[in-house]
Structures are given as C-alpha cells and as structure tokens.
Amino acid sequence: MVSTKKVLLSVMVLVLAAFACAYAGTPHPEEMGSQDCIECHVEATPDVYKQWEESAHGFTGVKCQVCHGDEVNFVKSPDNATCEGCHSKQIDNNMAPQARCASCHISHNFTVHKAHDYK
C-alpha cells in the first residue's frame, strides 16, 4: 500500500510542475546563439531599436534581456511584475494599478524622462 506521505509528495510535485510550466516564458522565435539582441534587432526591427536606444533604458544600458528574458524564457510583452523589479516606487505610486505599465508607457519609448537627463 502506498503511504499517504508519498501520495502527498507526488501531488505536490505535480502541482509545482504545472505552476512552473504555466508561468514559464516561451522560447524566442529565432535561435539567438551567443548574439546579443541588439545584433539582430538593429536590422530586423530598426524602429524598435531606435526607440529603445533613445529611451531611458537605452541611455542607462538596460539591455533587452532584463525585461524580455533570454532565448529560452522569452516574454514578448512583460507584465507589471517585471517592471516592479526596478520600478517598485513608481508601481506603488501608480494612479491606475490595474493597468499594465505599457498601457501608458509606450513600449521601448519611455517618454516620461527627457534625453538630456541621461546624457
């Protein structure tokens, strides 16, 4: 007879595995190898690259992987929890906490800050 502890342990492992799969990112649509995102996106999506380059993230060197993950755990549209990692003060003072950050702050074009503040 299977002990109750083994059954509970098995159920717990299955629940944790399901949770991990549900919240894991998806693979990047292209194989990246050892490339940095910029190496491809400067030509593949030049408008997005230019927006990032001129944003607060670009000026301060915040690379794509910080928000979008890596090749294996890629997230096309990061959620507020990702932003909160660096911007907890802004999240705490958000006047629309139910809204996604990107609903007001245009992706890759963070216009809240002025370019001269970072140069």
Image (spheres, rainbow, N blue to C red):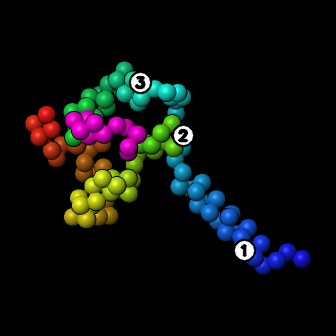
Alpha-carbon span between mark 3 and mark 1 = 47 Å
The alpha-carbon separation of the residues under discs 2 and 3 comes to: 17 Å
Residue 41 x, y percent position in the rendering: 38, 26
Q: Which residue is mark 3?
A: 40
Q: Residue furthest right?
A: 1
Where is residue 73? Give x, y as percent: 51, 44
Disc 1 residue type (three-letter)? Leu
Q: Is residue 100 visible to the viewer in this orientation of the structure?
A: no
Magenta-tinted stretch: 57-67
> Quick check: is 64 in the magenta stretch?
yes
Residue found at the far bottom of this picture: 4
Which numbered mark, 3 or 1, is in the foreground of this view?
A: 1
Q: CA distance from mark 2 to mark 1?
A: 31 Å
Quarter location, residue 57: top left
Element under label 2? loop
**Of callouts 2 and 3, the N-terminal one:** 3
